[in-house]
């Protein structure tokens, strides 16, 4: 009996020390999830290494290795390409959205003019679907651990395949094919296997932690009415943060939860005068103070922050059903206001309906 107990303890210690990602895989229900893998490039030559290794070849090979691991673990997988054929960005997005994928992962190999640069990095987009950062973060962590490559971090990038997919999405750059030493590694099965294993483990860990939140119910409708009581400021100082009361009526067909995993929050999208998103201040949240049933109005504190640069800006208020959808992605419009930041001509005055009395606290404009 003592020997058996000792063996059990030894096995437990081994698993906890050397396979930390395995502790969560038993929690997954793989068949519930559909993963779309997107091997970057295809068709055209694209980036090549110093000795001619082509990025598109590496991307596809790594993606196929990830696919085989996922399928072997019971997950459903769709490839945007499984041969050297051109696929447009719009087609890649359409494949993921049309099939209602749980996650989308685009697989790439980096290249720059400076041949000394090396390391791995993974992108998400703050303009994309919720939980993209967490997917990218899990993948980045496991690729770095498996390959031993320098971590260049998780980065916010407005890539088309990240901003137009309606599920958590990440774009992984395994190594720099432009670096001679890394190109040599990328030629080997062993190194490609390490990248593929890292991506696989990252996807599995993400689904174990957030997977239940990524399965979007098909019977939800997303509608909201907003009212800022004419309190959104028309001018701010650079970097200034302002809080003010804000009311939203739930015009959806489900109760908005104020707690995880599928809580609903008010989110802010900030654009400059040319319509470009200010990514550093995009997607900031204000939480609901309580659950909000269909038809109910909730009032809470909205907090916005001005950019540090001067100019005219537009802030768009949008509800977000975390892990499921931005309301605007489901056809519910945003509520937009304009303001100026230090030292520029003031923007046109904001014209809103008269704020309701405290007893009403009812938003005046419906957004569908």
Image (cartoon, helix red, strand yellow):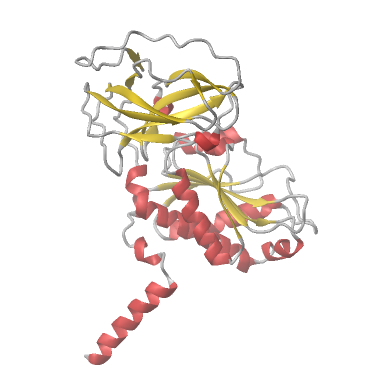
* 276 vs 215, nearest the viewer: 276
* 112 vs 269, nearest the viewer: 269
The image quarter in which residue 22 lies: bottom left
Is there any visible trace of residue 93 in the rendered image? Answer: no
* Residue sitting at x 66%, y 44%: 41
* Residue sitting at x 60%, y 26%: 310
Tally of marks? 0
Q: Is residue 281 left or right of residue 226?
A: right
* Residue sitting at x 52%, y 56%: 140
The image quarter in which residue 168 lies: top left
Residue 62 position within the rendered picture, expressed as x and y whole percent measured from the top left: 59, 57
Q: Is residue 275 left or right of residue 46?
A: left
* Residue sitting at x 29%, y 44%: 260
Quadrant occupied by the N terminus: bottom left
Residue 269 vs 153, above or below: the answer is above
Q: Is residue 8 left or right of residue 101?
A: left
Residue 47 position within the rendered picture, expressed as x and y whole percent measured from the top left: 73, 48
Is there any visible trace of residue 236 in the rendered image? Answer: yes
Residue 87 vs 110, above or below: the answer is above
Quadrant occupied by the C terminus: top left
Q: Residue furthest right?
A: 51
Residue 250 vs 184, above or below: the answer is above
Q: Is residue 189 left or right of residue 281?
A: right
Residue 27 position within the rendered picture, expressed as x and y whole percent measured from the top left: 31, 59
Residue 36 vs 298, above or below: the answer is below
Residue 253 position within the rendered picture, expressed as x and y whole percent measured from the top left: 25, 25
């Amino acid at each position: 009996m003592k020997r058996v107990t000792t063996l059990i303890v030894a096995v437990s210690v081994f698993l906890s020390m050397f396979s930390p990602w395995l502790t969560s895989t038993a929690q997954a229900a793989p068949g519930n999830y559909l993963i779309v893998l997107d091997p970057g490039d295809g068709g055209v030559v694209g980036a090549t290494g110093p000795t001619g290794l082509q990025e598109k070849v590496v991307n596809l090979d790594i993606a196929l290795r990830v696919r085989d691991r996922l399928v072997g673990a019971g997950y459903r997988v769709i490839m945007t390409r499984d041969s050297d054929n051109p696929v447009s960005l719009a087609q890649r997005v359409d494949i993921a959205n049309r099939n209602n994928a749980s996650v989308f992962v685009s697989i790439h190999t980096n290249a720059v003019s400076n041949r000394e640069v090396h390391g791995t990095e993974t992108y998400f987009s703050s303009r994309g679907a919720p939980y993209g950062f967490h997917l990218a973060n899990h993948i980045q962590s496991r690729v770095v651990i498996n390959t031993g490559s320098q971590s260049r971090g998780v980065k916010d990038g407005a890539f088309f395949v990240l901003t137009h997919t309606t599920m958590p999405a990440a774009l992984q750059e395994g190594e720099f094919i432009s670096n001679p030493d890394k190109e040599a590694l990328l030629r080997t099965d062993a190194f490609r296997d390490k990248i593929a294993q890292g991506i696989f483990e990252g996807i599995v860990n993400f689904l174990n932690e957030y997977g239940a939140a990524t399965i979007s119910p098909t019977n939800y409708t997303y509608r909201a009415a907003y009212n800022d009581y004419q309190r959104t400021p028309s001018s701010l100082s650079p970097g200034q943060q302002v809080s003010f009361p804000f009311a939203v009526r739930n015009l959806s067909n489900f109760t908005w939860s104020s707690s995880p995993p599928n809580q609903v929050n008010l989110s802010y999208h900030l654009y400059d005068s040319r319509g470009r998103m200010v990514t550093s201040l995009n997607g900031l949240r204000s939480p609901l103070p309580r659950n909000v049933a269909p038809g109910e109005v909730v009032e809470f504190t909205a907090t916005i922050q001005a950019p540090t640069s001067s100019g005219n800006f537009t802030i768009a208020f949008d509800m977000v059903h975390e892990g499921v959808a931005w309301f605007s992605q489901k056809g519910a419009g945003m509520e937009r206001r304009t303001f100026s930041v230090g030292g520029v001509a003031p923007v046109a005055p904001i014209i809103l309906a008269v704020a309701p009395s405290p007893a009403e606290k009812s938003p005046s404009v419906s957004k569908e």
